[in-house]
Amino acid sequence: MRAHGPRAAAVLAVAAGLSAVSAVTHTASPPAAPPSAAPAPEEQVVAKACTGCHALPPPDILPRAAWTAKIYEMAGLMMTGVGAPAGARAAIPTDFDVEAVERYYQARAPVTLPTPVPWPAVGEHSPRFARRVLRLPGGDAHPAISNVRFLDLDGNGALQVVATDMTHGLAMRGSPAAPERGLSVIAHVAAPCHAALVDLDRDGRPDLLVADLGDVPPADHLKGSAVWLQRREDGGYRTRVLASGLPRVADVEAADFDGDGDLDLAVAAFGWRQVGSLLLLENRTRDWSQPVFVPRTLDTRTGSIHVPAVDLDRDGRPDIVTVFSQHYETVVAFLNARDGGFRPETIYTAPHPAWGSSGIDVADLDGDGDLDIVAVEPRRSDQGPPPVLPSLVWLEQVAPGRFERRTLEVGGRHVSVDAADYDHDGDMDLVVGNFLTDTDSWVEVWENLTVKK
């Protein structure tokens, strides 16, 4: 079992470097005619209307033609309080001049967004990989792999592939050393988003915690749940729901947050626009045939993606680190206090609400002793057909805090990746999940052929 602590700490250590790389991936906007000066009242209306929930969006993050629809959408949400901080009233009156906001952005937005700076070609200064496919026998050609992991499922030191498919409702396993055997189904879950390995009941058998969205399309429902796949003596799994009636759950992680000797749960209830929160489920179980977890809300913001547990301040107590996406786009540490509470501290906030926070993996991909970043970049666009862009990228740490971009694949359709040395040959291999692709290749294992020690 790989600990979350060092990996989570590494994410924070390289966050500043990743942000710096992100900031230079686009060219400057082409010269445009100077916009006419907006009247002072418009400046005031925009500042009041657009900063109640998040930072003021710069005009150059969307092309000019996209702003009108976005402004009216956001105005409607704000008038009803959607997205507002807990306890806040709508920051704008129902009769505010939405046309003034529209004029402000129309006058300043570029006609088109600049062309991204080209990434290096595939293979340029990057590791070489042998790609092997894992298929689900009888599966269709429309996988929707939401999460892939290398995990020691059997507790014998041999890493297995664990994958969740959110549209087919499957948690699966497969052998990276024998991909021709394909994937086998561990359990059926409504819309699994993430899996984590933990021995929850301390019986010596590794279990799985599965985050269940409840339903695939984004919506403000309460169908999400935290699911425990309890390992049986015969090697199979017994499905138990530890918490239900939740917003869409994106992640569940375990740690002894209150120091009483059992494992509690941190839950990223992503939700959507009106419902969603960061939860702590305190373990009060006395009989594991009837597990009992008592929920406590740590933060009412929607959009929590991951909740790794790590002793961030090195005081001996596990803290929680999360990324709030949606319009918050911020990394927050919830520091475990001695009184049983958690103190939120913002670590990083993106420069605008359309930043698009997502998950990443951290590993020493090139074997040089420092930590690099591997990230999936889904091909998507709100403005038309998706361009052919890098879909699997590597940010190589070439000096402390300085990263250079590498391309591992162009044009793929992935949303998840994990790195580990599954074959124990001294280098980092990858497992990649395919998402909404017309292929029967559900999962791919990428054996690293480059670094040999």
Image: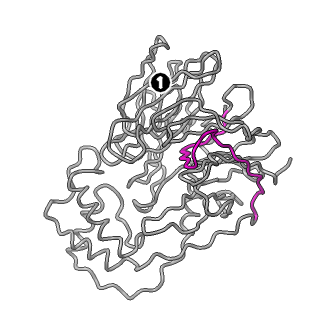
User: Is 4 situated above or below 449?
Assistant: above
Q: How far across and how far down the image is residue 372, in percent?
A: 67, 53
Q: Secondary structure at mark 1?
A: loop
Q: Which residues are magenta?
A: 125-151
The residue located at (50%, 14%) in the rendering is 288
Furthest-front residue in this view: 138
Which one is nearer the viewer's eye here, 342 or 433?
Answer: 433
Is residue 170 toward the left or the right of residue 345 in the image? right
Q: Residue 129, image x and y in percent? A: 76, 54
* Residue hosting label 1: 258
Q: The residue under label 1 is which amino acid type?
A: Asp
Which residue corresponds to the image point at 65% horizontal and 61% vertical from the top-left? Answer: 402
Specify the farthest residue to the top. 287
143 within the magenta span: yes
Image position, residue 292 (x, y; %): 42, 18
Scheme of colours in the image? one colour
Indicate left or right for 452 with 415 as reference: right
Q: Which residue is located at x 25 percent, y 65 percent?
A: 72
Between 193 and 35, the one lying in front of the other is 193
Number of residues whose C-alpha sits closer than 10 Å to that of mark 1, classed few (under 14), some (14–19) or many (20 or more): some
Q: Is residue 242 magenta?
A: no
* Front position in the image: 240 or 437: 437
Relative image position of residue 231 (x, y in whole percent): 59, 21
Q: Quadrant of residue 190?
A: top left
